Image (cartoon, rainbow, N blue to C red):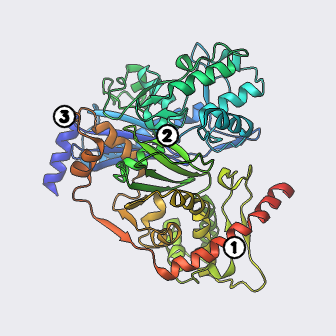
Amino acid sequence: MADDLARIRAAITAGDASLGIELGSTRIKACLVGPDGVPVAGGSHHWENQFVDRTWTYSLDAVWTGLQECVASLLADVQDRYGVPLTTLRALGVSAMMHGYLAFDGDGELLVPFRTWRNTSTGPAAAELTELLGHNIPLRWSIAHLYQAVLDDEPHVPQVRSITTLAGYVHWRLTGRLALGVGDASGVFPVDPATRTYDRGMVSTFDALVADRHPHLRLDDVLPEVLVAGQEAGRLTAEGAALLDPTGTLQAGAPLCPPEGDAGTGMVATGSVSPRTGNISVGTSIFAMVVLEKPLQRVHTEIDLVTTPAGDLVAMVHCNNGASELGAWADVFRQFATALGSDADSDTVFATLLGQALEGDADGGGLLAYNYLSGEPITGLSEGRPLFVRTPDSRLTLANFIRTQVYGAFGTLSLGMRILAAEGVEVDSLFAHGGLFRTAGVAQRLLAAAVGAPVAVGRTAGEGGAWGIALLAAYLGADGTDLGEHLATQVFGGATLDVEEPDAADVAGYTAWLERYTAGLAVEQAATDAL
């Protein structure tokens, strides 16, 4: 132990540690890794989106306040653990929730509040672009937001000179360079996997579409440049260092990797960047990323075509709603425990409830749960109303209730994964990550039933995308080594994985539950209409 501390302390002092920062939906997290890619320190800051004027958003002030508090907690963690300050870095990377719309004028001023991935107000634009380009353009993609603003004649459009994602915006402020990693860029506008940049034919088609109304919206001028994993994307400026750490402890000069989206960093954090591999990330949203061997045969509005951080084609099943509703119910039970005089903390309550789920009936006892806090494009719902539904003869027990809430977190994902299976997409392994998997075995087992495939979870399952972007930062200067090979040999070679095979009884029960879930979507639609 003393040798490990001395080794890590020496690496930090020598500036040989790499830092990844990810702005997730509910937490901004920092992860510092040593030369071997192993996490050695961390920091975090909790934040929440706001629903303002029927738009899901975060203020830019909240972005920088959150980043500074996150970095401050990281610096304190390094000092506490190793007794040395963190002043210089080998490399730095920024990741954030994908998609959305951040539009700026020629002076770099934000034109309208940040529109996050949760917003589903871009239906006409997404449908028209999907038809025109022959490529699925989901509601949350940046280009859908831009074109919807054009269709709506929003007054800010004539002033737009650049658009980017949240990760791209933070990177821009830290380095002065408007760039995106190819994975994040593929959720802005379609990317050609052969060239690993925006599809030239589609760019020309879009430019022609808006030329009469807004000739200044030439995508080559408006979109960030695209870079792939391993390329340097600028260096931390003095102004950028001061934005992250106003105390001046963290110094300028570190190179940055291309900024990435949380989908790409989740792939890296699970080593799932090679064909026939995939990963499932569970947080505020839930999504599966499957690296394809070949393009899909048809355009599916339920499936995004994006890329890995290295530019390889990926089928993405993205569901706007993940584990938030399950977390809300866990908090209700925590409040009940407190009312009984228990001092059990949130983690203990959550783990206890998840354990109960395995005691429930395989089909959930006839109960249904919809986790729709926001709209869900895969099931055609523009807004969400969380629901718990049962019939008079349902078997209402705590175990069935919690099992159904976990099933509810996976329901929409299952519908998307069935589309990939019908396309003949084969996956050798699915890796799961996110805080839900810190409780060993439970969510992993039920997820295996939901997707009908083995699900692996590593010891770093709770580290998530902050670790993934730290690994991409450390990948800078990897001397041309393939990203998948680099991760397999340098990071995951000796990793311990827990693998859950689908249990036949669980699969049969979940299949019956999913049939009721699909039929019950009419109830969810009625709730959005009435409430």
Foreground disc of the pair 3, 1: 1
- Res 266 visible: yes
Give the residue number, with chain letter if any, for mark 2.
96
User: Dot 3 surroundings within 10 Å: few (below 14), some, or many (20 or more)?
Assistant: some
User: Dot 2 surroundings within 10 Å: few (below 14), some, or many (20 or more)?
Assistant: many
2 or 3: tag closer to the N-terminus? 3
Query: Spatial distance from mark 3 to mark 1, Cα to Cα?
Result: 59 Å
Q: Residue at x 52, y 73 (%)?
A: 354
Query: Spatial distance from mark 2 to mark 3, Cα to Cα?
Result: 28 Å
Q: Residue at x 45, y 28 (%)?
A: 197
Foreground disc of the pair 2, 3: 2
456 over 310 or under it: above or below: below
Q: Are marks 1 and 2 in contact (CB under 8 Å)?
A: no
Q: Are marks 3 and 1 in contact (CB under 8 Å)?
A: no
Position of the C terminus by quadrant:
bottom right
User: Whole-percent x and y of residue 37?
Assistant: 26, 47
Q: Residue at x 20, y 36 (%)?
A: 13
Which amino acid type is marked by label 3? Ala
Q: Name the one closer to the observer, 10 or 182.
A: 182
Residue at the outermost front position: 297
* Count of picture labels: 3
Which amino acid type is marked by label 2? Ala
Q: Residue at x 51, y 39 (%)?
A: 66
Disc 2 secondary structure class: strand
Give the residue number, with chain letter if any, for mark 3.
14
Position of the N terminus by quadrant:
bottom left
158 over 301 or under it: above or below: above
Give the residue number, with chain letter if any, for mark 1.
516
Residue at the outermost left position: 3
